[in-house]
Image (cartoon, rainbow, N blue to C red):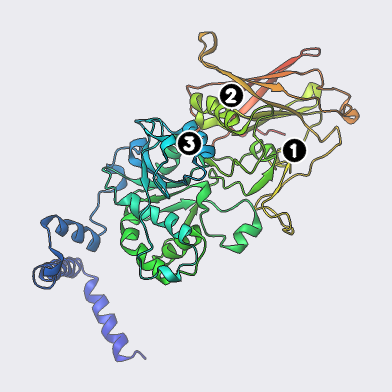
Amino acid sequence: MCSPLSLKSTTIQQKLATPFSLGAFGKTLAISSIIVILSYILFFDQSNSFQPSNLLTIFKQSFPAVTAPPGSHPPTNLSHIVIGIVGSMNTWQQKKAYIEAWWRPNVTRGYLFLDRAPTKQFLPWPSSFPPFRVNENITGFKVYPKIVSPVQVRMVRTILEMFRESDKDVRWYVMADDDTVLVVDNLVEVLAKYDHTKYHYIGTSSECVRSNFDFSFDMAFGGAGYALSYPLVAVLATKLDECIERYPYLGFSDFMLHECLTDLRVALTQEKGFHQIDLHGDISGLLSSHPQSPLLSLHHLDTIDPIFPSMNRSESINHLMKAVSVDPSRLLQQTICYHRPSNWSVSISWGYSAHIYENIIPRSSLRRPIETFWPWQRSARVPLYMFNTRRRSNDPCQAPHVFYFDSVDHHVKGNKSTVTTYARVARRGLGSCSSSGNHSADSITEIEVYSSPEIRLEMGGKECCDIVHAAGMSNTRVVYRACMEGEIIA
């Protein structure tokens, strides 16, 4: 038996079920809402110096559905993205080389937010750097005495201060640190798949289980970079200081933002191309088995070894950017193929490295990074990482011959091919794998990889390859091609 309230509710639902009633109700609701808004503006909000342009803003906030559908917008491009870089004058001398590697003057939009004005040694400010801004002084805030970490509050408020720059035609705000390297072409491609008129919070977790456990598995780590859609930043800008007042005891800017966005009912969308790099040592194992996702960022470059042997950190990044300039879509994308006559497995991380194994190793194993690195906290207990790894091995049937990206040649011999060359840096120092028939790869000094720059690798796309090699050759060729329907690579 239904209660009177249930009966009343059922009756209303039945009445609304007819097309005429639904339309009438919708019109009545819309008209009533507009009248309420106008009444508030005209009679109850005189103290706020109302401007006519405010009416459109209020109307859009009241009726978020009154926006153009995603398909009616032109494709997202780099001009739609504004990048906020959080930096410090104390470390700018050491960090500026990382930003110079990826920032495109007069093309990339954004700002470098500093804790204080640049010193004389950096003035006049070079046009090759992002324009700088000095973060607002928060010492006068009423909540300031309760703030556990003013530096972290400065960092999170950079979002608000960037929004106040009032840049036009913005779809996305991207935040990063001054030691973050971004691949902006891939960033455009990834963000373009999302509806920028909706609330989006896009980033990644740490590579380490312990770091995520200490904060949140659903939080974007800011050093890796994260993206916020314009509508989300617009509402966040009105709520951020209020949120800081709620959480002055939080000592980590990324976690504070996560809490503020959670209060707005906005959850993180994970993108595997962002990299916090909460690791130490040699990360070549990770970069050689990158997830099948466009590379978006690398962080903590000062806490790891240079990513290329015989180069310093800034030289390594500039070297990587040579491959980015030719084909960012393939950068670090792993392609695996086999040479049966030699019993070789070959794994290519385009633009970074090539591995030859003297054995047929399943793809599922080769896609796991070799653990050449160690976690951010050495005392952490297993499980250490958010992904599966392989241990280093001295078994000649399991240890790879390693070659690093040496050069890239675009449009070779007019056949519209890109050739990337990978050179051996050091001998493996092991015998040959006897179980595979002693087909040693010790004589190989160079690997050439042929790909087509005319065909951009789609997000999550996979390519197949063929190996051209004859006994006694000192180099090996790998030719990329489209995979055949139902083709099995094993």
Q: Earlier in the sequence, mark 2 or mark 3?
A: 3
> Within 10 Å of the Cα at label 3, are there few (<14), some (14-19), or many (20+) other Cα atoms?
many
- Quarter of the image with the N terminus is bottom left
Amino acid at circle 2: Arg
N-terminal-most mark, 1 or 2:
1
Mark 1 lies on residue: 362
The residue located at (42%, 56%) in the rendering is: 154
Which x, y percent locates residue 147? 45, 67
Q: Tell me the element at label 3.
A: helix
Q: Quadrant of residue 472?
A: top right
Q: Nearer the viewer, mark 2 or mark 3?
A: 3
Question: What's the CA distance linking mark 1 and mark 3?
Answer: 39 Å
Q: Which of the pair 258/490 is nearer the observer?
A: 258
Task: Kindly report the distance in space between the C-alpha atoms of the residues bearing marks 1 and 2.
Answer: 20 Å
Judge by depth and name the residue closer to the eye, 394 or 155: 155
Three-letter amino acid code at the position of disc 1: Pro
Mark identifier at residue 481 = 2
Q: Which mark is residue 99?
A: 3
In terms of secondary structure, where does tag 2 sit? strand
On screen, residue 47 above or below 378: below
Mark toward the start of the polypeptide (1 vs 3) = 3
| Other residues around mark 1 within 10 Å, as few (<14) / some (14–19) / many (≥20) | few
The answer to whether 297 appears left or right of 119 in the picture is right
Residue 198: tell me if it is visible: no
Q: Can you give x and y, in whole percent of width and height, for residue 415 in the image?
A: 52, 11
Labels 1, 3: front one: 3
Local SS, label 1: loop
As rendered, which of 302 and 28 lies closer to the eye? 302
